[in-house]
Structures are given as C-alpha cells and as structure tokens.
Amino acid sequence: MKNVQPQGSHFIDGAYVEDTAGREIPCVYAATGEVVATLHSATPAVIEQALASAKRAQAEWAALPPVARGRVLRRVAEILRERNQELSELETIDTGKPIQETTIADATSGADSLEYFGGLAATLTGETMPLGGDFVYTIREPLGVCVGIGAWNYPTQIACWKSAPALACGNAMIFKPSEVTPLCALKLAEIYIEAGAPAGLFNVVNGYGDVGAALIGDQRVDKVSLTGSVPTGEKVYAAAATGIRHVTMELGGKSPLIVFEDADIENAISAAINGNFYSTGQICSNGTRVFVHEDIVDTFTARLVERTKTAIIGDPMDPETQIGPMITDTQRQKVLNYIRIGQQEGATLAVGGGCPERDGWFIEPTVFTGVTDDMTIAREEIFGPVMSVLTFRDEDEVIARANDTEFGLAAGLFTRDFARAHRVVAQLQAGTCWINQYNLTPVETPFGGVKKSGVGRENSKAAIEHFSQVKSVYVALGDVEAAF
Ligand code: NDP
C-alpha cells in the first residue's frame, strides 16, 4: 500500500495544519482492515483558524471579476482530469470502492462540476424591472462563508459538488468530510491552491460529528450544505435555524424502481443492478424497492439472480473487480442485520446474503424476492447491496405504493409506453426520476429530494439559487410624494 498519510489533518489558509491534541482518526482501508493513515479531529483552535481565514478569503474572492473566478474553477477541473488515476486510487483507498468505478465516477464527476460552474460564474447577473419611469435592478450576491459536510460514499464528488457552485457565486467554503473518508477532500484543497484560488477560500477541517456541529454553531457561517442521513439532517437544520442561516439538505432515500410488463427486461435488470449494487449499494438514490409487474416477475427474477451470481467481488485495486467492501465493519454489520430481519419477516433470499471469506468488510450482492410493503427491508434505508423485489398488478396501485414512504429522493420506471411513463412520473413523489434508466446524475441536472430526503438542489443552474441571494435596488427618477 502506498503512503497516503497527509502532511497534516486539515488544510487551512493554503497549507496543511496539524494539532495532535485532537482525538485520533484512524483511516482504515476497507478492503484489508489496514490502518493507512492517522489524522486528528479538529480542535477549537483549528476550527477558529478555518473560520477566520475563510471569512478573509471570501471578501477577496468576491471582489474578483466573475470571469477570473470561473477561470480558477476551470483550472481545477483540468487538474482533476490530469490526475484522475492518482485521485481515483486515493478515492479507492479512502472508500474501498473498486478502481473500475472510481476512475469514471469520482474525480471525473467532480471535474464536470468545476467545469460547469466555472463556465457559469461569469453569467450570474441580475435583472432589470422597468416601472414606467422608475425601475428596479437586482444584484446576485454571495451568501458569505458556507460549510459543506459530507457523507462517506463519494468524498471527492461531494466536496466538488458543494464547493464548485459555492465558489462560483463568490462564497468561501469550509468542508468537513466524514471521519471515515478524510483523505480525498484534502487533495482537492491542494488542487484549489495550485489552480490559483486564494488561501482560505476552500478549507478542509477533518473531525467527528462534533466538529461539524461546532462549525455550524459559529455565526460567521452563512450557509450549510449537508449530505448525510435524515437524523443528522434534522440536527444540522435545527442548528442552522439559530441565526436563520441557509441550508441545503441531501439526505437518505428508499426509492422505487418500477418495471412494467412491456419493459425491456434486460435493460431493467441492468438498471436494478446499477441502482442497487454500484458502490456496494452505498448510494442515497438507489432504487432499493424494485416493483416488478406480476406477469414478468419470474423471468425478471431468474435473469437477475443469474446475472448477480456473476458479479466479481475482490481487490478494489484490480480493474476486473466489480464489487468492493462496505465502508466499515459497523456498516457491514448493520446491513447483515437487515438481511437477518428480511429472512425473519418472511422474504425469500434469492441470492447472496453472506460474506466472502476474505479480509475486509465484504458482503455479497443480495436479492430478496416476495417482499411486501410492510417489511422492514422495504421501509428503511439499508445503505448496502440489498435489493427488494416486490410485485404489482396495476398502475394506480404501484404509484400509491411507490409513494408510501417518508423519503422522496428518486424514482425510476421501465416501460415502452411513453404516455404511461410521463403519466406515472407526474405522480411520483421524488426529486429525480428516470425513464428507462437509473442513477445517472449529470451536472446539468438538478439533484435533491422531496419529503424527508431533503431541501434544496445540487448541480445545474438550480444550485446557484442555493448559494446566492438577490438584492433588489429601487431607482426613483422623480420627486418623492408624502402625505404631509
Ligand atoms: P451521517 O448523517 O452519519 O453523517 C453525515 C456527515 O454529518 C458526516 O460528516 C458526519 O460526521 C456529520 N455529522 C454527524 N453529526 C453531526 C452534527 N450533529 N452536526 C454536524 N455534522 C454532523 O451520514 P453517513 O456519513 O453515514 O452517510 C450515509 C447517509 O448519507 C445515508 O443516509 C445516505 O442516504 C446519505 N446520503 C445522501 C446523499 C444525497 O445526495 N441525498 C448522497 C450520499 C449519502 P461524522 O461522520 O464524522 O460523524
């Protein structure tokens, strides 16, 4: 294993910073259980340094012409692409995801985001409203200092998806990665400096949940964007309410994938596999409730099981490997517990359910059939490679059942009948829907949830609304009338 120990646990004001007084954060490679680096959770002194430098850098950055800001972001995108191999290997070490995935889905997706928002930076203008003499113009202004808090499944992508729109709008960002994936965002911070961003504009502060809470607790912070679970989302949302700060919440899901009787079955199975087993199932928008029409469920299940058995589980650094380990043993135990509950509640284990005999936190891709809506595995977010296949008979029934969840992140459907596709999509309660596809999230598309899955949108022009505010300026050309 190559040396991935960073020069410091945090990256603040353009340089690595260390304070060994903070609680240790062991960085474990999930494929072997080996400790590959040791970091320290941020102390109050480190947090203060991050806040003070971000505040200073934000003023400097916001004063630049937007086209100059955009140029820096686009240079970051170029560097991310140039170093894709090295960054992908680091992402694999940080998360355990197979290199086959990380070379196409992490630094590259981050680069798309930097390129997109870098291009958009100079186009962020206000409007003019003529009032028949007097007029109003608007100015789109940054919010100030933004805090980004990330989950562990996509550490590079989440840091880019949050920082690119934030910085394009003229904000600074302090990013707090999940403590189980502390390495990737530090590299991104180095790259921002190399690309010409002012010191302090993008700071990375590592630590446990209390560090995130301390950052949001500081009133110099104007906005928080969280990717995480619903319980954390509720805490962070409440903390941001003190001082009426802005929030974006990208939270969990239990999304439906509906396969109608006229669907292309092989494509639908491919989507179900991607939407349940990619990144070993650790994806918020996964279509974990697969509703299959009763006329085709036997054919669908037989092929799904056959294909799932061919999945290559193994060393994430081997380009042939398709399934890597779970992020931690704790997460694996949580998933194994859900598998036990699924069996106890009467679902049929069609394939998987066990752990391969090897080091690391591996678990087999698992399919349950005969799942009913009331079962725990059909109601709770598992965040692992566990697919539930449910059957349905008609359209209205499946729409009602698909919507019968507290979550609303995503939904997908497969049919050759486009009238039905649009009719059903219009009724699904989800922030993102796919017709004859699943889990593609290009930067051009708004991404986010409804119901408990979140508020706000990432990516696309919609993200600009969440990282800026509008000032209206009324301009009078005549006299001022007053009653007395
Ligand atoms: P958590 O909610 O456990 O943690 C998310 C982040 O919040 C971590 O960095 C965590 O720090 C931090 N945190 C925890 N407590 C607090 C607090 N009180 N104040 C501030 N920050 C805090 O999520 P996971 O990391 O376990 O990620 C899995 C979850 O994320 C799933 O529910 C998944 O659906 C969701 N997710 C959503 C996505 C989306 O875009 N909608 C995408 C990816 C994942 P620490 O880890 O150090 O405790």
Image: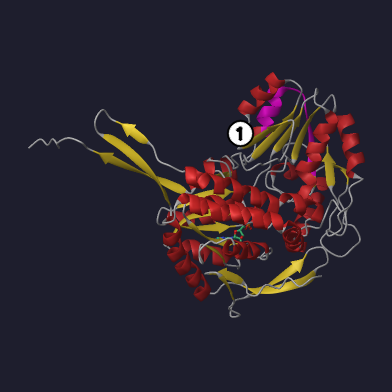
Q: Residue at x 54, y 49 (%)?
A: 165
Q: Is residue 197 above or below residue 230?
A: below
Q: Is residue 435 above or below residue 228?
A: above
Residue 4 located left or right of residue 179? right
Quadrant where ligand 1 appears: bottom right
Q: Position of residue 351 (x, y in %)?
A: 89, 45
Give 182 or 363, whichever is nearer the viewer: 182
The image quadrant where one finds the C terminus is: top left
Q: What's the magenta region?
A: 387-402
Q: Badge 1 is on which residue?
A: 429
Q: Please check the rendered image and state whether residue 390 is part of the magenta-colored stretch, yes or no.
A: yes
Residue 107 located left or right of residue 60? right
Q: In the rendered image, which quarter is residue 204 located in?
A: bottom right
Q: Position of residue 46 (x, y in %)?
A: 52, 73
Q: Residue at x 61, y 67 (%)?
A: 208
The image quadrant where one finds the N terminus is: bottom right
Q: Position of residue 180 (x, y in %)?
A: 69, 64
